[in-house]
Amino acid sequence: MATTTTESTETLQTIVNERLAEAAGTAGEVMRGAGEAVREADMTLRGSSDQVLGLLAALSVGLALGFVLSGASRLLIAASLVPAAMVAGVLAERMDRENRAAIRSPR
Protein backbone atom coordinates (compact mmCIF):
# COMPACT_ATOMS: atom_id res chain seq x y z
CA MET A 1 0.00 0.00 0.00
CA ALA A 2 2.87 2.38 0.79
CA THR A 3 4.29 1.76 -2.68
CA THR A 4 0.96 2.68 -4.29
CA THR A 5 0.77 5.92 -2.31
CA THR A 6 4.34 6.80 -3.23
CA GLU A 7 3.66 6.04 -6.91
CA SER A 8 0.47 8.11 -6.81
CA THR A 9 2.32 11.01 -5.19
CA GLU A 10 5.09 10.85 -7.79
CA THR A 11 2.54 10.68 -10.62
CA LEU A 12 0.66 13.66 -9.21
CA GLN A 13 3.89 15.60 -8.79
CA THR A 14 4.86 14.84 -12.39
CA ILE A 15 1.48 16.03 -13.67
CA VAL A 16 1.66 19.23 -11.61
CA ASN A 17 5.20 19.95 -12.83
CA GLU A 18 4.12 19.47 -16.46
CA ARG A 19 1.15 21.82 -16.02
CA LEU A 20 3.33 24.45 -14.34
CA ALA A 21 5.81 24.26 -17.21
CA GLU A 22 2.97 24.75 -19.72
CA ALA A 23 1.60 27.69 -17.74
CA ALA A 24 5.04 29.30 -17.54
CA GLY A 25 5.39 28.99 -21.30
CA THR A 26 2.09 30.73 -21.98
CA ALA A 27 2.66 33.40 -19.31
CA GLY A 28 5.34 35.03 -21.45
CA GLU A 29 2.99 35.18 -24.43
CA VAL A 30 0.25 36.66 -22.27
CA MET A 31 2.60 39.33 -20.89
CA ARG A 32 3.80 40.27 -24.38
CA GLY A 33 0.21 40.54 -25.58
CA ALA A 34 -0.77 42.65 -22.58
CA GLY A 35 2.19 44.95 -23.13
CA GLU A 36 1.25 45.41 -26.76
CA ALA A 37 -2.37 46.16 -25.80
CA VAL A 38 -1.25 48.80 -23.28
CA ARG A 39 1.01 50.49 -25.86
CA GLU A 40 -1.81 50.53 -28.39
CA ALA A 41 -4.24 51.97 -25.81
CA ASP A 42 -1.68 54.62 -24.89
CA MET A 43 -1.31 55.67 -28.54
CA THR A 44 -5.10 55.84 -28.90
CA LEU A 45 -5.43 57.95 -25.75
CA ARG A 46 -2.73 60.35 -26.90
CA GLY A 47 -4.68 60.95 -30.13
CA SER A 48 -8.01 61.54 -28.37
CA SER A 49 -9.54 64.91 -27.58
CA ASP A 50 -9.76 66.26 -24.04
CA GLN A 51 -13.53 65.69 -24.04
CA VAL A 52 -13.13 62.01 -24.90
CA LEU A 53 -10.45 61.63 -22.23
CA GLY A 54 -12.70 63.28 -19.64
CA LEU A 55 -15.57 60.99 -20.56
CA LEU A 56 -13.35 57.91 -20.33
CA ALA A 57 -12.00 58.97 -16.93
CA ALA A 58 -15.52 59.63 -15.62
CA LEU A 59 -16.71 56.25 -16.89
CA SER A 60 -13.77 54.48 -15.26
CA VAL A 61 -14.24 56.19 -11.90
CA GLY A 62 -18.00 55.59 -12.04
CA LEU A 63 -17.44 51.92 -12.73
CA ALA A 64 -15.03 51.69 -9.80
CA LEU A 65 -17.53 53.40 -7.49
CA GLY A 66 -20.20 50.94 -8.61
CA PHE A 67 -17.86 48.08 -7.81
CA VAL A 68 -17.14 49.56 -4.37
CA LEU A 69 -20.84 49.94 -3.60
CA SER A 70 -21.59 46.41 -4.77
CA GLY A 71 -18.82 44.93 -2.62
CA ALA A 72 -16.64 43.69 -5.47
CA SER A 73 -13.10 42.50 -4.87
CA ARG A 74 -10.32 45.06 -4.50
CA LEU A 75 -8.50 43.66 -7.50
CA LEU A 76 -11.51 44.32 -9.72
CA ILE A 77 -11.85 47.84 -8.32
CA ALA A 78 -8.17 48.55 -8.95
CA ALA A 79 -8.39 47.15 -12.48
CA SER A 80 -11.36 49.39 -13.25
CA LEU A 81 -9.28 52.45 -12.29
CA VAL A 82 -6.44 51.67 -14.73
CA PRO A 83 -8.03 53.63 -17.62
CA ALA A 84 -8.51 56.66 -15.35
CA ALA A 85 -4.84 56.51 -14.37
CA MET A 86 -3.79 56.30 -18.02
CA VAL A 87 -6.00 59.28 -18.88
CA ALA A 88 -4.52 61.26 -15.99
CA GLY A 89 -1.05 60.56 -17.32
CA VAL A 90 -1.94 61.74 -20.82
CA LEU A 91 -3.64 64.90 -19.53
CA ALA A 92 -0.71 65.69 -17.24
CA GLU A 93 1.69 65.29 -20.15
CA ARG A 94 -0.43 67.61 -22.30
CA MET A 95 -0.58 70.24 -19.56
CA ASP A 96 3.18 70.01 -19.05
CA ARG A 97 3.80 70.38 -22.79
CA GLU A 98 1.49 73.42 -22.95
CA ASN A 99 3.18 75.02 -19.93
CA ARG A 100 6.63 74.53 -21.44
CA ALA A 101 5.46 76.03 -24.72
CA ALA A 102 4.00 79.03 -22.88
CA ILE A 103 7.24 79.60 -20.99
CA ARG A 104 9.37 79.41 -24.14
CA SER A 105 7.16 81.66 -26.29
CA PRO A 106 8.08 85.35 -26.23
CA ARG A 107 5.44 87.68 -24.91
Image: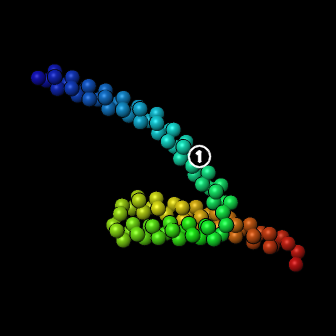
Say if residue 97 shows up in the picture: yes
Residue at screen point 26% across, 29% down: 12
Percent across and percent down for residue 87 are: 59, 64
Residue at screen point 21% across, 23% down: 7
Q: Which residue is mark 1?
A: 36
Q: Nearer the viewer, residue 70 or 1?
A: 70
Judge left or right: residue 57 versus residue 2.
right
Q: Nearer the viewer, residue 90 or 1?
A: 90
Give the answer, above or below, for where 67 lies relative to 25.
below
Judge left or right: residue 87 versus residue 76.
right
Percent across and percent down for residue 72 are: 35, 63
Say if residue 92 shows up in the picture: no
Answer with the quarter of the image where residue 53 lies.
bottom right
Percent across and percent down for residue 15 are: 31, 29
Quick one: quadrant of the C terminus? bottom right
Give the answer, above or below, for where 11 lies relative to 26.
above
Percent across and percent down for residue 103 are: 81, 73
- Give the residue furthest to the right: 106
Give the answer, above or below, for where 103 lies relative to 23.
below
Judge left or right: residue 54 versus residue 1.
right
Q: Residues within 10 Å of mark 1 (few under 14, many from 20)?
A: few
Residue at screen point 55% across, 68% down: 57
Looking at the picture, the colour scheme in use is rainbow
- Under mark 1, the amino acid is Glu
